[in-house]
Image (tube, rainbow, N blue to C red):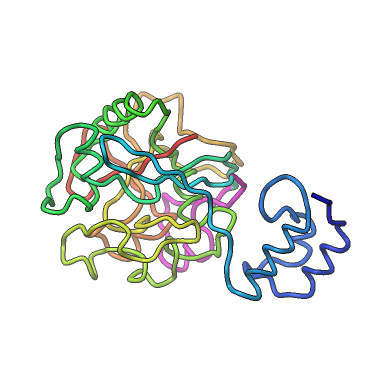
Amino acid sequence: MKKLSLPLLLLVMCTFVNPFQASAEDYYKRGDVNGDSIVTITDVSILLNYLLFGTWPAPVEETYTVNGVSFTMVNVKGGTFTMGATPEQLEAGAQYIEKPAHQVTVSDFAIGKTEVTQELWLAVMGTNPSWFQGDLSRPVERVSWNDCQLFIEQLNALTGKNFRLPTEAEWEYAARGGEMAQGLIYAGSNVLDEVAWCSDNSEATTHPVAQKAANELGLYDMSGNVSEWCFDKWDNYTAEAQVNPTGPENTTSQVRVNRGGCYGLSTSYCRVSSRNNYGPGIAVSYQGVRLALQ
């Protein structure tokens, strides 16, 4: 495909308002809108399509099937973002463990479109440990970090893939919307009821996945329903910029990061930068899991 000159690209972009509140200069520096490492007329077409018709190309998804149960992973284009207590998070009640905000770069990865359901866990493990049963489309819960490692090991044996838990940085980057992030308080909205089951609307129970609105990447329930395990061991933030962080290495602690709100938490704990931690053997009814894949 023929390359588009940067001056022409800049002219086109200056003509319109950027849907994600970046300046024309930002797009001049980052004209590769579709992330294919080249600036072409396709990039302009994507922008025009959004501005004229309100549509933005959906991230690429891949569906896998295990013992008759299908689940979908969403491919996420990597990038650099500010992790932690960014201004909108501070205004909404960010806590000290979310500070300082710092720059993080993550590589491309895939993440579960939804939390792992009871149906998928049952198909892989042959058991359902969840407290809230009766509908297998609800997220699996009452699973420890250690349980999740066994589940992933078995899933990989069945699929031949290398599924894993997301890192904390990948989780937050995806929850914020990746490259399409709009600086929202929760994963997909500034109104929590639109995107999450929390203490205000859940009636103290989990709900089938993907019943609320998705975020910019098409991911569901990242701000509520059940909280989700991450790979990382727990650590306090520093101001240092990081690339693909995976948690502290020089520690004997096995405490692991926990992310996302849940059916029993209030609004402040459902923000995209909110974080928590548990021992790897803890299994409670508000704790679930979402898969990642490199």
* Relative to 261, 20 lies left or right: right
Magenta span of residues: 78-102
* Image coords of residue 226 (percent x, y): 27, 52
Residue drawn where x is 29% and y is 26% of the image: 154
* Relative to 8, 91 lies left or right: left
Residue drawn where x is 16% and y is 33% of the image: 126
In magenta segment, residue 5: no
* Image coords of residue 64 (percent x, y): 38, 39
* Relative to 24, 34 lies left or right: left
Nearer-the-camera pick, 102 or 42? 42
In magenta segment, residue 80: yes
Please identify the quarter of the rendering in which residue 270 is found.
bottom left
- Residue 113's place in the image compared with 164, above or below, is below
Nearer-the-camera pick, 155 or 256? 155
Please identify the quarter of the rendering in which residue 108 is found.
top right
- Residue 112's place in the image compared with 155, above or below, is below
Nearer-the-camera pick, 28 or 99? 28
Number of marks present in the image shown: 0
* Image coords of residue 201 (percent x, y): 23, 70
* Image coords of residue 165 (percent x, y): 38, 36
Residue drawn where x is 60% and y is 42% of the image: 105
* Relative to 253, 32 lies left or right: right
Residue drawn where x is 20% and y is 57% of the image: 206
